Image (cartoon, helix red, strand yellow):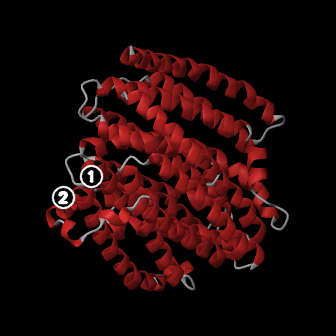
Amino acid sequence: MNKYKKLALNTMIFAIGSFGSKILVLLLTRLYTKNIDPIGMGIKSQLEMTALFLQPIFTFALQEYLIRFGLDKNYDKRDVFTTSSIITAAGMAAVIIIVPGLRFISTLSFIKGYSLLLSVYVCTSSLRMLCAQFVRARDMVKLFALDGILATLLLLIFNLLFIEWLHMGVKGFMLAVILSDLCSSVFLFLAAKLYKFVSPKHFKISLAKEMMNYSIPLIPTIVMWTITSLSDRLFISNMHSSRVQLGLDMAGIYSLAAIVPNLISMVSTIFFQAWNMSAISENESADRSKFYERVYNAYEAVLFIASAGLLLFIKPVTAFLNNTSNFEEYSTVYIYAPILVASAIFLSLDQFLGGIYTATKHTQNSLWTSAFACAANLILNYFLIPAWGIQGAAIATFLSYFMCFLIRMVDARFYVPFKVNFTRSLVNTAVIIIMCVIIIKSPKLWGLWLIPLCAAVIAYNFKALQATMHKVLKKRSSKTA
């Protein structure tokens, strides 16, 4: 099977497995907004982001080194899984010991009352990631996709039980995630027969050191991306301003606005799961630069088209996702979502370019470019949030992702040179920003103003997408002839 066909097939399988599950997770937002007030939503959001912050630290970036070494044919998969399992177990033990103490840090006071649940949450999330990423590394993408569907269905059932019926609020949400992840881990362990890959004799200290050397630069990288998201909420929760309203309830509103771009991230994640495997597998191929060019052109076009379409329907989408029957404050979410949609485009492109660092093992570059984005985000948050509130946090996020994109576009192409149409990228960005400003300002008949702009993005990018797909299909035909 040639590289284009395999990428397309894996993307399709991940889409089948992920699309329904991710849509279902988005729809759970209605359940949350019906039963949890804005302050509770702020706590829920910060607990989620804290878990995302802790998980890569205590597992040594498990999600990165397991897929990288698991796909590499030079390593015995039993060695990879056993060594990864022991590293993960050590990290989980550390979580149980250390995490409960975080509640005494004033900035993390929202952890009080949730420290035990947070510890278990991180452990079960790590366990599921261990099993799921190794299943991917064995190229069992259909099972990986099936697990995504089953885990989400269980998440829905547990959420209904704990939140809708037992009215347990934030604690109910955490219990639902914990049980869903635990069931998923058991399912994958048995269905993929992972027990055959675990044996004390396959623990290799030399491999563990190699994994650590590879992943340690990635830990700050992953953590920094999480800090970028978590810091927004912490700044909004803890800062004071005489110009705009801030506080834990506004952090809850911001967290709901940040859910809307997940529709873009959903497209990105589905593609990236397949792309990451292809990038590693094709790292030594003779025509990898042309491969990157064609895939990047199509990927960028899809992101801008999807974002323009989402912005066109931003108000009905946010109204559908958020239940305002009990908390009217949620009706303002659509005003804060547009800039975050634009941010999601460049976060996705940053991930694409970061895949070059992963494939070529230049993870230190991933570290310093992420560090720059994180530092920029923190500085911008400090100045913009007191002045513009939630909108300031969104702008800070966009600018930090955009700056990281510019840096990586120059730096990453030293390792895999491929051509990029910068004019198209800048025009697309300008039109998307104009659409965002129109939505935020909401002039009379603003919805009609968005239609020609959305149509322009589709027309402008469809040609690039069509040209790329023609080259891909032509390549496939020549390969199979």
| Pick the front one: 125 or 232 | 125
In the rendered view of the protein, which quadrant contains the N terminus?
A: top left
Q: Is residue 439 above or below residue 223?
A: above
Residue 218 % position (x, y) = 31, 56
Instruction: Check disc 2 and report its element: helix, strand or loop.
Output: helix
Task: Name the residue at 36% across, 23% down.
Answer: 419
| Pick the front one: 231 or 57 | 57
Can residue 368 be seen here?
A: no
Residue 210 — which label? 2
Q: Are marks 2 and 1 in contact (CB under 8 Å)?
A: yes
Compared across the picture, whether 415 is left or right of 160 comes to: left
Residue 69 — which label? 1
Task: Name the residue at 49% across, 32% down.
Answer: 299
Instruction: Check disc 1 and report its element: helix, strand or loop.
Output: helix
Residue 323 % position (x, y) = 79, 60
Type of the residue with mark 2 = Glu
Compared across the picture, whether 62 is left or right of 27 comes to: left
Task: Name the residue at 39% across, 61% down.
Answer: 193
Q: Is residue 292 above or below residue 230?
A: above
Residue 164 % position (x, y) = 76, 72
Quadrant of res 415: top left
Task: Name the residue at 65% across, 34% down.
Answer: 308
| Pick the front one: 89 or 242 | 89
Residue 187 — which label? none
Q: Residues within 10 Å of mark 1 (few under 14, many from 20)?
A: many
Please count the marks in the image.
2
Among numbered discs 2 and 1, the one appearing first in the sequence: 1
Can residue 473 be seen here?
A: yes
Residue at mark 2 to residue at mark 1: CA–CA distance: 10 Å
Type of the residue with mark 1 = Phe
Q: Nearer the viewer, mark 2 or mark 1?
A: 1
Residue 452 % position (x, y) = 72, 24
